[in-house]
Image (spheres, rainbow, N blue to C red):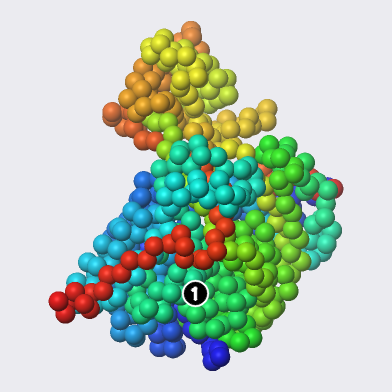
Amino acid sequence: MATVGDVCRHVRSKNAGPYWVTFDLFFDGAENFAKYSQSPALGPDLLHRLFGADPAQVKRFSVPSLNVVKISYARTTPQGGEVERDMHRGQQFVRLLDVQLD
Amino acid sequence: MFEGPIKIIVPVGSLGAGVVEAEVRRGVALGAHAIATDAGSTDSGAAYLALGMSKNNRGSVKRDLTILMKAGAEAGIPVIVGTSGQAGGDKNVDWTRDIAVEIARELGLSPRIALLYSEQDKDVLKARNAAGKITPLAPLGPLDDAAIDACDHIVAAMGPEPYMAALRAGADLILGGRTTDTAVIACFALLHGAPAGAAWHAGKVSECGSQCAVYRDRGSGVLLSIGQDGFEVEPLAPDNRCDPHSVSAHMLYENSDPFRLTEPGGVLDVTDAVYAEVDDRAVKVTGSVWEPQPYTMKLEGAAGGRYQTLMLVGIQDPDVLGRVDEFHDKMLAALYDRARKSTGLDDAAFHISLRMYGWNAVSGDRPPPGTPAPREIGVLFVATADTQELATQIAKACNAYFFHYPISMDKELPSYGFAFTPADVERGQVYEFKLNHVVQVDDPLELVRTAWIDLRKEEAA
């Protein structure tokens, strides 16, 4: 049983423009990247469950040269809106750390 | 005929963030042909566009721009600044212009300054929209006039062409309005015939200055060298270095797609880019591809919404800290009740939120049962209403409840730790971006206005 936090050396989140949020999962090596980068646990449903994202507005990329998986989703609340809690979305990665990959 | 390579100093990630003079000198000594940097981003929210206000303070921007203008004048190379004043609206450009003119007078310089404005007239945009020239980007839908009217300011993100035209016309200093970060850096090399894939990719890699280097805390800028077969990048700080990983990883940063970046007039595709070590400091990148597309400019519009007033208390009372969620819910209900009775407003007319810092303020999620009690929490009270006066009235009405609300009714009233007097802080309006659309243009300059300040002529006159 491995979580994202177990097999990544670094996970980060950030705005990608005012309407998108992007996560970069830096796996700790080629082995875990190969094993987990295609994991269904990192699919659009995860973003729906954790962030209320529209699964149709989730993009996912593998970057093998960096052992990175990038996941982006369309923001569900406006940046800087009345109930903003994370203007730059820099803290959103924390919810990914405990996601079970197998 | 491109003779290359073209060398560009990117001195800093954002003008005002801290240019290092020795780095700029080093870049000039290494044969730089131009200095280019952006001065803003949408990343910190819509307030800066809505208000025409800079995020960086005037002193910091003046300090950085002084170093760049002096170096540019001494070396006889142009200084190129995009997205002036954080948001690149007309007011943001004019704020930066005034600083530049002040610097020129203080240093006895007489540059020809080109001002590139890309703020858009609402009627022009409505007409373009009616003509089918404006299309939405996900996740937004088609644009309507109401969204245009809601905005305080709207800018169109420029590509490199207005900068190339200003350089051709002899600009020593360009202060641009909203522009893509990459275009600001790519424009000089594109003007001189550099391959587009290399020029654009170099712009993307260096848009945050030395963030594409290995050590984030060493130095500020990078030097680009854009040639026929690719580009090289190296940090300007002697104790930093770039490696293939640090450079390629920057394509991930703040991009929703790590391979394809849409720009005015095309898409930069780095899927097949190769990053190779040149020596222990520099990386060479080849294989970047530019795919020309119909020319579009991205629109950004910022609008002011309702107003907010804040209060903040700190709580260390162990009775509260053992039951934070229950405390939150009960206090919020009591505050709503008090605000309703005090103002006569119904719930739709105002909003109160409590953010429990030290517990769950960032996520708003309920921590799982059994989560240990925190040592203390900060509770941020946010009242939102149609006017500042009303938001403050609500805060004032809630003050005593926020200060004393007990977790157990059978004990004496507690008093929580206010940080300030007066306790309420008027925060101003809520600002949001309203547009995520592109406008198609036939000519990259048709929505851009260029103005000139020629201090040489002013001196002569």
Give x and y (percent) for residue B52: 36, 50
- Answer with left or right where residue B40 lies relative to residue B134: left
* Residue type at numbered disc 1: Cys
Q: Residue furthest top?
A: B410
Q: Who's the residue at 58% across and 24% down the image?
A: B325
The residue lying toward the viewer, choosing from B204 and B364, is B204
- Answer with left or right where residue B286 lies relative to residue B238: right
Callout count: 1
B396 in relation to A85, above or below: above
Question: Quadrant of the rendered structure where residue A33 is?
Answer: bottom right
> Circle 1 sits in a helix, a strand or a loop, which is it?
helix
Q: Is residue B445 visible?
A: yes
Q: Which residue is mark 1?
A: B187
Question: Quadrant of the rendered structure where residue B228 is?
Answer: bottom right
- Chain letter of disc 1 in the image: B
- Answer with left or right where residue B32 lies relative to residue B437: left
